[in-house]
Amino acid sequence: MKPRILVIKLGALGDFAQAFGPFAAIRVHHPGAEITLLTTPPFAPLARQAPWFDQVWEDGRPRGLAALWALGRQLRAARFDRVYDLQTSDRSSRYRWLVGRGVEWSGIAAGASHPHANPRRDFMHTVERQREQLAMAGIGHFPAPELGWLDADIARFALPDRFALLIPGASPGRPAKRWPVENFGALAAALDIPAVILGGPAEASLGLAITQTVPGARDLTGKTSFADIAALARRAAFCVGNDTGPTHLAAVAACPTLALFGEDSDPALCAPRGPHVAVLRHQPLAALKLADVEAALVDLITQQPATA
């Protein structure tokens, strides 16, 4: 019988993108296993495109006792041999009781067979923290994840050959993570190529504000899937965005990415990772000058390899 492995990663988008490396490492370490991902509905379609999982379950945050009971029955019935908890939250740690205490567990749950036993884990960048967690569980090979699948048909957007991505949104509950939208508008106006605005439906007002200032900009807020965002990033000249999920996804997709940080998040812990990423931090972020962003963008673009 094939070994049965469960991987837990519930979200959010930036964290999910930064888990691509661990996902790939787990797949390589367990080549003959049946690997199931437990996640949440927003990330299930992206996970099903990826080559790392045999099954994707999207009930990772059940609402109500009946749904929790159903998840518990599903987890126990699967008879997993090992769990890699990459969420490492209080919620995901409690799932150890649902899976069964005899199952091998990598994470921070009490009684885990393979605990991430570093008291300073919370002071590590997400990527290094997850790599160390897996190393403590016996995974020693971390190949670069193959991302050829991370693409989509974006012909329906009818974009020009050259365009830039601007990502002016961020968590609605953390306004200090947002560079003011009028500054994104000024940046769009200063570019010599069209700007494409990305974000979720809740950020439509930001896209509208920029396109009203810069009629040549394209507002795609609320119109893209995660796969669309990655496909746009693959083809964009560069991306400028706040510390938010789409910026992380653009970076993973190898788009030259300038990530803007303020006082509300620490790039040492959660900066986007990718082959061509620069971080510009200013406290407060609202006071970051357009000229400084333009200068950082020039540095990012001019430092790219000639073949990029």
Image (cartoon, rainbow, N blue to C red):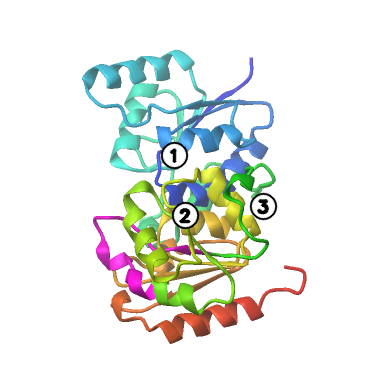
Contact (Cβ within 8 Å) of mark 3 with mark 2: no
Q: Which mark is residue 246?
A: 2
Q: Secondary structure at mark 2?
A: helix
The amino acid beneath tag 2 is Pro
Instruction: Determine whether, in the image, residue 154 is placed left or right of residue 42.
Output: right
Q: In which quadrant of the rendered view does residue 5 lie?
A: top right
Nearest to N terminus: mark 1 or mark 3: 1
Magenta residues?
165-183
Q: In which quadrant of the rendered view does residue 8 lie?
A: top left
Q: In which quadrant of the rendered view does residue 237 lie?
A: bottom right
Disc 2 from disc 1: Cα separation: 17 Å
Magenta segment includes 23: no
Given residues 59 and 237, the one toward you in this image is 237
Nearest to N terminus: mark 2 or mark 1: 1
Q: What residue is drawn where x is 52% and y is 54%?
A: 249
Query: Where residue 175 appears, x then y in whole percent?
Result: 26, 63
- Residue on which disc 3 sits: 144
In this rendering, the label closer to the viewer, 2 or 1: 2
Residue 84 visible at all = no
Residue 52's place in the image compared with 237, above or below, is above
Residue 212 visible at all = yes
- Decide: few, some or many residues near mark 3? Use Cα within 10 Å; few <14, some 14-19, many ≥20: few
